[in-house]
Amino acid sequence: MSAQNQFCTFYLDKLFFGVEVHKVQEVLRHQETTMVPLAPEVIGGLINLRGQIVTAIDLRRRLGLPERSPEQLAMNVVLRGDDGAVSVLVDEIGDVVEVADDNFEPAPDTLKDEGRDLIRGVHKLKGKLLHLLDTEKALTVSACAARNISSN
């Protein structure tokens, strides 16, 4: 019998993503963000989480997806990182799903270059693919900041 894994799921631009449940601190509705001058474009701002200032990373920008429409408010998935909590901005929160290891596959070749290295692989579910986000890479902003500086 194969091992089961639980993932907290969310949507970005109609794509279905998941992160391991044990890495999630909490999920929140839209929170007002404070913009950070001169920050890399993937930084969506800062949120106040019960007195704790938390950096919010816009996953659409981080993955090279189109911008969210102005009327669509981002949701927050707060992850536990090595340096504390970090929020990732997503379009919609999904459910917690449990999947078996035996249906895990490498990331498909159709993923864009910007986001390809941030996806560990996929699980085939009934009617859709669950893209597994590599949280360590996704939360590392220095690599994308260097890429943005070198392209300017």
Image (tube, grey):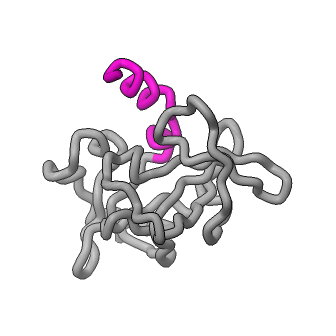
> Which residue of the protein is positioned furthest toward the left in this rendering?
109
Q: Is residue 149 magenta?
A: yes
Q: Is residue 71 above or below residue 131?
A: below
User: Could you say which is closer to the camera, residue 105 or residue 111?
Assistant: 111
Q: Count the marks.
A: 0
Q: Start and end of the magenta stretch? A: 135-152
User: Could you say which is closer to the camera, residue 27 or residue 21?
Assistant: 27
Instruction: Identify the residue at image location x=31%, y=55%.
Output: 66
Instruction: Identify the residue at image location x=45%, y=75%.
Output: 97
> Which residue of the protein is positioned furthest toward the front in this rendering?
70
User: Could you say which is closer to the camera, residue 133 or residue 73?
Assistant: 73
Q: Is residue 150 above or below residue 51?
A: above
Instruction: Identify the residue at image location x=42%, y=46%.
Output: 134
Q: Is residue 22 left or right of residue 69?
A: right
Please tell me whether the stretch drawn in magenta is mainly helix, strand or loop: helix
Instruction: Identify the residue at image location x=33%, y=65%.
Output: 13
| Residue 27 drawn at (x, y percent) | 62, 67
Q: Is residue 90 left or right of residue 86?
A: left
Please identify the quadrant where the C terminus is shown: top left
| Residue 117 drawn at (x, y percent) | 31, 39
Q: Is residue 146 magenta?
A: yes
> Which residue of the protein is positioned furthest toward the top in this rendering?
150
